């Protein structure tokens, strides 16, 4: 009974706070809807790639011929012939990878070496940063497979035809060799000797006939010349018979034939002097990461710091004004000479020192005990943290000026934390988020803070101007709005 | 010179009129008490006078200036003691007062001195190191009063200062108010204890956003009863005293005759409303010649009774007064 009474009281109490219920129910739903609309895993896993290739070169032809292989594995960002400009784009984060195709890949392949695709990327993310190497590995695999398939398809017919010709020639040579060997045998010599005798007799007969009175001279003369010619040739043969098989083969042109076959075989075997690995994989990749990714803890530490700063600052600031307004202190301040700006400035100073001090202590612990890098130096890190603190406090004060109850302020602070984890680049790279998430991210100090602290701590760079501007704009707009809301007279 | 001057003040929230055309003047150095039932507009009037709310219509001037136009130096002339404890429970008594002294711009040396003086005035110096959440409700109210006084304001707004306090503490508060008034400060006090109106120099009775009565406690008492009271105890039952009562009529109006049930013999108590009680007393003795007068005095009816009688003349019933 008593439990029921308490439960009923709590239930009706909550129903009397429609704004709180709206935040409790609609807030998380809206965040999840925005998350669903904004997260494109394919985009995260498919890096934006810029291809560097020399126009008119064999490399350019190769790219055009195998364009699909390059664009299928990446989000193709175009081609350029200026490697340095491409690198600058990479450093500015406009593309995720630069793929450089060699101008004359055949030269390397024919000399027995793999042609090299040089790939450069610039990622400190040990989780999603591996997308470039993985994608490039797949790209080279696809390219090699396509090249080998096409090579085989275009040359296999020629090879077959040549092989048949060689076989035919082999057979002819074998026949010729057999004939030559037959001619140089004893029997062959006898035959040619007998043939020579017969031709000699025929010559004599034809000479007699030629001298005969009724001979008109035409046909007999011709026959005699042919016989004499035959005897000359037969004499060469007999001489070759005497000199051996090789002389016969030379005489019959077989050697010439053999030479031709040898040449053909040599030509057929004139494939690159390359290992099977090169033939099977004519291309390989050389991947260079311009950044040095830290370990998992090192990578997430700056993000955790940024989230921590934002959450502590927003929570403290969002509760500060609403608490005093609800307990009546605010009315007391209104009657006193204390101005809204002074009230805000006083709170700001304390919370700023407290939040920054606490988080610097956390950063020191992370650096000393977990070895988290602070590449850009403690001063730059502290400045970045100070900027995030200022923006977060501004946002917190604005929440406090708008909230109707402490529970509402706490709820908004929690929603901001969830939104920051999802949209501010903590879990998923900010650049790969789309749609509503990008818009939401512009309003979250953590979006700028995570990127800034990663730049300073991991890359050792300075604070990006865009992030400085973003954080200062959030702080200025929030504080001015809060000042206006607090200074507004009750009507 | 008037510390507070209000002319035809109207305050509306949305379409609802909470204060309807008030005219009021509070003189410098006086304790002005504002009484009225819950929801009569007391807090709204005080918030308008302190500048927390802006009037919908009419003119409000506090220390010669509309409070909505107060500069910080004007605000230093005003002190405010809100209804509840609005300071910080986690801070000590002295830290709380130091904070408020800082709000009013007291420099370090003066602040130190004033904090001590004020805490001694409200008898909290002994408890200065205790956190405010660890002192009693009465002490918290005194700390709140100290916060309103630490900067030595000329005009002090005090909202329900004695709410939920025991009678002894309430009395001490009023002694302190009287002391402050003696120092020349003006006090504007709202109270739910009608009897405390007696302790004010002047009293305003607010009902339904309208000031239904305004004057000194005696003036209001006179107004409630239509004159001054003379009270007497006569031997005999009311029916036996018909001649005596008839004799009193030329002197004033008999408003109450009732038999004293506790007495061993028949005694009637009679209340007579007259124009001037002091002047009427000898005449009463004269007309009652022959009747046995047990006692004769000029009573001061409680302000609760005055309040009830005054409220009877308005649209709001006394029961609503809470």
Image (tube, coloured by chain):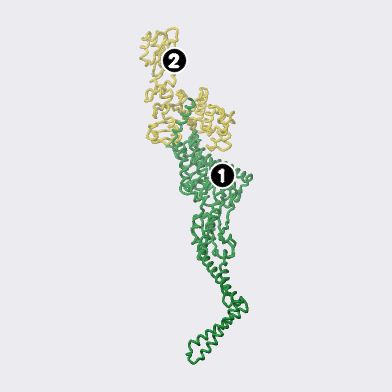
Residue at mark 2: B297
Q: Do callouts 2 and 1 mark residues in contact (Cβ within 8 Å)?
A: no
Circle nearer the viewer, 2 or 1: 1
Label 2 packing within 10 angstroms: few (<14), some (14-19), many (20+): some
**Are labels 2 and 1 assigned to the same chain?**
no
Rendered-image quadrant of the C terminus of chain A: top left
Label 1 packing within 10 angstroms: few (<14), some (14-19), many (20+): some
Residue A115 or residue A239, whichever sits in front: A239
Quadrant in the rendering for residue B245: top left
- Mark 2: secondary structure: strand
Residue at mark 1: A304
- Mark 1: secondary structure: helix
Q: Is residue B149 above or below residue A92?
A: above
Q: Which chain is green?
A: A
Residue B10 in view in this figure? yes
Residue A209 or residue B173, whichever sits in front: A209
Residue B319 or residue B220, whichever sits in front: B319
* Residue found farthest to the top: B265
């Amino acid at each position: 009974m008593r439990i029921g009474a308490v439960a009923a009281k709590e239930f009706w109490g909550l129903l009397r706070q429609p704004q709180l219920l709206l935040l409790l129910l609609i807030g998380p739903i809206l965040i999840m809807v925005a998350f669903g609309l904004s997260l494109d895993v394919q985009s995260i896993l498919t890096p934006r790639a810029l291809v560097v290739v020399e126009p008119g070169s064999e490399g350019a032809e190769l790219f055009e011929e195998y364009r699909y292989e390059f664009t299928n594995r990446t989000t193709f960002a175009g081609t350029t012939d200026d490697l340095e400009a491409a690198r600058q784009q990479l450093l500015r984060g406009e593309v995720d990878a630069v793929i450089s195709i060699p101008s004359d890949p055949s030269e390397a392949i024919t000399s027995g070496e793999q042609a090299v695709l040089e790939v450069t990327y610039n990622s400190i993310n040990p989780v999603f940063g591996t997308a470039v190497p993985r994608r490039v590995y797949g790209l080279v695999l696809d390219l090699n497979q396509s090249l080998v398939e096409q090579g085989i398809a275009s040359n296999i017919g020629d090879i077959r035809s040549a092989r048949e010709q060689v076989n035919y020639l082999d057979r002819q040579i074998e026949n010729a060799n057999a004939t030559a060997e037959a001619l140089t045998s004893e029997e062959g010599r006898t035959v040619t000797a007998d043939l020579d005798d017969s031709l000699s007799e025929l010559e004599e007969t034809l000479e007699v006939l030629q001298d005969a009175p009724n001979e008109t001279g035409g046909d007999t003369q011709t026959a005699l010349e042919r016989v004499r010619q035959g005897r000359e040739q037969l004499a060469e043969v007999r001489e070759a018979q005497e000199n051996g098989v090789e002389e016969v083969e030379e005489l019959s042109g077989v050697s010439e034939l053999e030479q031709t076959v040898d040449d053909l075989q040599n030509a057929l075997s004139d494939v690159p002097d390359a290992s099977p690995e090169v033939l099977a994989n004519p291309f390989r990749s050389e991947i260079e990461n311009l950044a040095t990714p830290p370990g998992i803890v090192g990578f997430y530490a700056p993000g955790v710091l940024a989230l921590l700063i934002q959450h502590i600052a927003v929570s403290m600031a969002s509760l500060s004004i609403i608490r005093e307004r609800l307990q009546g202190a605010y009315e007391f301040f209104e009657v006193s000479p204390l101005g809204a700006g002074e009230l805000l400035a006083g709170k700001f100073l304390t919370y700023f020192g407290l939040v920054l001090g606490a988080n610097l202590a956390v950063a020191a612990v992370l650096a000393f005990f977990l070895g988290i890098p602070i590449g850009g130096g403690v001063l730059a890190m502290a400045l970045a943290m100070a900027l995030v603190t200022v923006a977060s406090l501004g946002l917190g004060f604005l929440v406090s000026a708008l909230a109707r109850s402490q529970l509402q302020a706490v709820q908004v602070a929690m929603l901001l934390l969830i939104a920051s984890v999802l949209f501010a680049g903590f879990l998923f790279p900010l650049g790969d988020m789309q749609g509503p998430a990008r818009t939401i991210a512009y309003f979250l100090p953590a979006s700028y803070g995570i990127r800034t602290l990663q730049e300073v701590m991991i890359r050792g760079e300075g604070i990006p101007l865009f992030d400085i501007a973003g954080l200062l704009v959030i702080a200025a707009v929030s504080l001015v709005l809060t000042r206006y809301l607090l200074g507004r007279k009750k009507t | 010179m008037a510390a507070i001057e209000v002319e035809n003040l109207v305050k509306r929230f949305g379409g609802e009129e909470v204060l309807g055309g008030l005219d009021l003047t509070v003189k410098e150095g006086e304790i002005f008490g504002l009484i009225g039932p819950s929801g009569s507009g007391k807090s709204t009037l005080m918030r308008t006078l302190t500048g927390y709310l802006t009037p919908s219509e009419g003119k409000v001037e506090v220390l010669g200036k509309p409070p909505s136009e107060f500069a910080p130096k004007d605000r230093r002339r005003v002190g405010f003691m809100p209804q509840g404890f609005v300071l910080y429970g986690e801070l000590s008594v002295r830290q709380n007062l130091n904070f408020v002294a800082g709000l009013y711009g007291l420099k370090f040396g003066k602040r130190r001195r004033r904090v001590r003086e004020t805490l001694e005035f409200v008898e909290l110096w002994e408890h200065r190191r205790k956190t405010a959440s660890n002192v009693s409700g009465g002490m918290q109210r005194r700390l709140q009063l100290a916060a309103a006084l630490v900067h030595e304001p000329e005009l002090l707004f005090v909202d329900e200062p004695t709410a939920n306090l025991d009678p002894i503490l309430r009395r001490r508060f009023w002694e302190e108010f009287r002391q402050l008034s003696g120092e020349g400060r003006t006090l504007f006090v709202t109270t739910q204890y009608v009897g405390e109106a007696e302790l004010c120099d002047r009293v305003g009775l607010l009902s339904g956003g309208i000031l239904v009565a305004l004057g000194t406690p005696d003036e209001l008492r006179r107004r409630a009863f239509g004159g001054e009271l003379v009270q007497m105890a006569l031997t005999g039952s009311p029916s036996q005293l018909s001649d005596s009562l008839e004799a009193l009529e030329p002197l004033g109006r008999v408003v109450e005759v009732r038999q004293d049930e506790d007495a061993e013999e028949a005694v009637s108590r009679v209340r007579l409303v007259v124009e001037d009680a002091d002047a009427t007393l000898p005449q009463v003795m004269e007309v009652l010649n022959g009747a046995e007068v047990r006692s004769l005095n000029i009573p001061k009816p409680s302000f609760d009774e005055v309040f009830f009688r005054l409220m009877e003349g308005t649209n709001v019933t006394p029961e609503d007064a809470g």
